[in-house]
Image: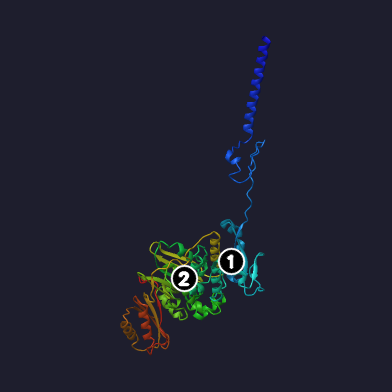
Amino acid sequence: EKKRKKKEKKEKKEKESTIMINRRLFVALLTAVPLVIVPSCMAFSSSLTGKKPTFLKMSSTAEAPAVPEAPETAQKSLRLGIFGGGTVGGGIVEIIQQKAKYFNELTTQNIDVRKICVRDASKPRDFTVPSTTQIVTNYDDILNDDEIDVVVEVMGGTTDAKDIVFSALRKGKDVVTANKALIAAYLPKIEAILEEVNSDGSRVEFRYEAAVCGGIPVIRSLQSDFVGDEVSMISGIINGCTNFMLTAMDRDGKSYDEALAEASELGYAEADPTLDVGGFDARSKLKILMRLAYGIEVDEEDIDCRGITDLTTVDFDYAKKLGGTIKLLGVAERVEEGKIAAFVSPCYVTADDPLFAVIGATNAIEILSKNLQSSTYIGQGAGRFPTANSCINDIVALAKGDSSALPFNPSSGDQFVNDYQSTFFLRIKYEDKIGITRQCGEICEKHDVSIHSILQNPVTSRQDAAFVIITEKVSLNQIKAVCDEIKELDWCTEEVFYMPVLREDWMR
């Protein structure tokens, strides 16, 4: 009996020892191997997925099971086709090459210049053409290339450029352009094409920051910064060539011809400078600004436009006597509720005006509004890199996915009126005779024009002298009637030159 009890006691102890060993082993396994719990309905049922069941194999080491790496995604690219390999086109390519890494980080896309269309493919370029870029001479090489996302038009003109832009939009390609003449001439048509191609929910974009004042971001500002505001007036130096010339006439005492020759030598003036000196370039830009600021569509020809060709050093002499200077300005103003007036003209500007100190080829625009009151934008209005920089901003915005449903802002019910009121500066050239002042007074009285003052420098030649009349605030049409009558008098030697004074409060 003793032997039996001793044997049972020994077997019990061995059994307890075995259980203890198994428990320790189980705990060790739990701490050494990750526990994966898979619901039975998902782990073993093939009916839900239609695939063979998959069993997870437990690792005998402490390392977690390897997770399969996701396949690498190819880097996206925004592919460009550029029309024009000259000054601005070359600037765009150079900036893209210099800042490729930064643009990639900013947009998560490579900006890839695929093709550049030029007139002469054999002509040497003043920029390095990327090895992946193809130089072509056929427009369709870009327009019919389905891989090209964005057409950049910097060739200028309003004939071929129009066909290129219209075709690109209709083919679903975004467009970036610096062509203010094209936009001013065909803005309603561009708007209609965009409405047509986007009617199915597409988002074809039209960008044109570089079209007005080169490197100054005034287009984007009017599209986004004044949406809750009400613009009352826009006034600006929006042509660099003429501002350079007027600076030379004012500061250096040069004649019109001397100032034009210098502007041409430095590349500010074209071989035919008519668009600049005649004010027509500024008028095209003003039309675009008016649409953005006031929502009105106006025929360019209806905007009163006078250039700088009639200005003389005598005008600057009298402007200095008044304490100011002369600038060629584009001005648009809300003259009353629902009515907008506009003009391009030389203007007398006082010394305390923001535009007074803007010299050389620099551009400047002042916007007066209800909320922001006065906002002034100053910068380079033309040139390789200022203009290219604005094109680049539009390209990068597209790469980032920015969208502008109405690139010209919504239309309004405002009406354009081809008349405005201002104080006016009249310069009258004459042969000295008795009764000149009396006759001028009578004509002004006849047209309800009140004279504020008459200025006259010492007369050095009785056959070729000039005096200036400063009026009170009157309408443009009244001034035109006065000038037409005075020029018919026998002592008046040429047409009367007139220009508005920019500010109503110019007299202190």
- In the rendered image, the vertical position of residue 92 relative to residue 430, given as above or below: above
Check disc 1 and report its element: helix, strand or loop. Answer: helix
At label 2, which amino acid type do we have? Ile
In space, the residues marked 1 and 2 are separated at their CA atoms by 23 Å
Residue 288 has which mark?
A: 2
Residue at 36% across, 86% down: 485
Relative image position of residue 191 (x, y in whole percent): 48, 69
Q: Residues within 10 Å of mark 2 (few under 14, many from 20)?
A: many
At label 1, which amino acid type do we have? Ile
Residues 432 and 47: in front is 47
Report the colour scheme: rainbow
Of badges 1 and 2, the one in the foreground is: 2
* Circle 1 residue: 92
115 on left or right of 382: right
Q: Earlier in the sequence, mark 1 or mark 2?
A: 1
Q: Is residue 80 visible?
A: yes
Check disc 2 and report its element: helix, strand or loop. Answer: helix
Q: Where is residue 61, by image quadrant?
A: top right
Relative image position of residue 313 (x, y in whole percent): 46, 79
Hey, which residue is sitting farthest front in the picture? 47
Q: Residues within 10 Å of mark 1 (few under 14, many from 20)?
A: many
